Amino acid sequence: MASTVPFSPAKVQMLKATNCHGHAAFGSCFAVPRTGLKQRSLAVRVSSEQEAAAAVRAPSGRSIEECEADAVAGRFPAPAAFVRPKAPDGTPEIRPLDMAKRPRRNRRSPALRAAFQETTISPANLVLPLFIHEGEEDAPIGAMPGCFRLGWQHGLLDEVYKARDVGVNSFVLFPKVPDALKSPTGVEAYNDNGLVPRTIRLLKDKFPDIIVYTDVALDPYSSDGHDGIVREDGVILNDETVYQLCKQAVSQARAGADVVSPSDMMDGRVGAIRSALDAEGFNDVSIMSYTAKYASSFYGPFREALDSNPRFGDKKTYQMNPANYREALLETAADEAEGADILLVKPGLPYLDIIRLLRDNSALPIAAYQVSGEYSMIKAGGALNMIDEEKVMMESLMCLRRAGADVILTYFARQAAVVLCGMGSAAK
């Protein structure tokens, strides 16, 4: 239906001569100034669709009607003869297989492969783990090329700034605590002015929109290097440890943590932490539970980074047996019932079956931790030119997503985000 638009007389004369693209004008192409018109306006009738179509001319100067007449009469050059691409000499001449379904048809071009890609990954799916310490200088971690213990007041802020610049907005903190502050009961873990709470407050002041995850466990603070309090006979005390973890989680929430992440694998700790947070008014603080954390050999470089190796024994009485599959369902059911908001599997790539198991049996978000050993192996392989580091990095992250991980904790977060933003070679 035709409509009316107000114009000044001078503007009408100008628009009669040219439209907004510099061509012969017709009504639907008018740019209409809404302000500053003090002259008397008049109404200009906008051309109907039929009038507009008649005014359109092809580059040859022929109208649409003339072109359509050519199509009806078939006045077009004959198509070129079809020539099938030639196979190399020696290719056998065969009768094509009688196949109705050929899955390769949907893979034959980049555009088709992109159209049918089932799994995607973006910087929003990545969480960057950050090692922090009390020093002002950043200290390189020998077993993790490219990773540093960051000075909490300077290097940390620079790293977060660079990560945010490529779309990574989630970070998890791991502290290197001075030996003098470690104790058998890990009391430094809930010091409100300790390294982690100070760092959280600083980050939230400088970058209020980021998501800060924290680690809830005693091993960085324990003189024994275990995730819990150790009895004199070597037994890890469960309930007494959970009591300490609740105080640690509340201290982190008070500092401004968005997500507290119990990685200790004590029984019942998720429910106890949820109750402690709610009792202190932190109902909106989420819990990411390390639901299926295995007693893995892939953690070595991480323990070097934090100097948190157990002083004796191992962690097999509380972390899961790498041979077990169904046990992950028990941990999943317990964490869901106790109020976990996110379920995490650690390590990542060697445990894709566990990620898929949790994905298929829970509606909660699933996280995967691509741990230090996975990171260091890819870095070492790339340094030795045994693999293409960037391509293997991206493939490994995509596999974690395909298995069912909603978010991935990875030391590659910033490097991968650079690629995903089109700034790296793998994106070309």
Image (spheres, grey):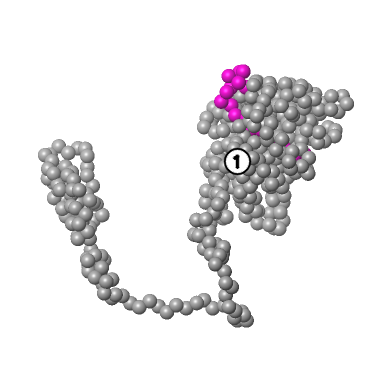
Q: Quadrant of residue 52?
A: bottom left
Q: Residues within 10 Å of mark 1 (few under 14, many from 20)?
A: many
Which x, y percent locates residue 426?
A: 57, 55
Query: Which residue is rendered at x = 61% and y = 24% of the image?
Result: 253
Which x, y percent locates residue 92?
A: 62, 80
Looking at the picture, does residue 125 appear above or below residue 135? below
Residue with the mark numbered 1: 407
Query: Which residue is rendered at x = 24% and y = 65% of the image?
Result: 64
Query: Which residue is rendered at x = 70% and y = 45% of the image?
Result: 351
Apparent side of residue 54 relative to residue 285 in the rendered image (left or right)? left
Whether residue 96 is visible, yes or no, is yes
Residue 281 on the magenta span: yes
In-front residue for pair 122/74: 74
Apparent side of residue 2 relative to residue 126 in the rendered image (left or right)? left
- Report the span colored magenta: 277-295
Looking at the picture, does residue 51 appear above or below residue 66? above
Residue 169 on the magenta span: no
Looking at the picture, does residue 419 appear above or below residue 273? below
Q: What is the three-letter code of the residue carrying label 1?
A: Val
Which x, y percent locates residue 195?
A: 67, 26
Query: Which residue is rendered at x = 57% and y = 75% of the image?
Result: 96
Name the secondary structure under disc 1: strand
Apparent side of residue 334 relative to residue 108 in the rendered image (left or right)? right
In-front residue for pair 53/138: 53
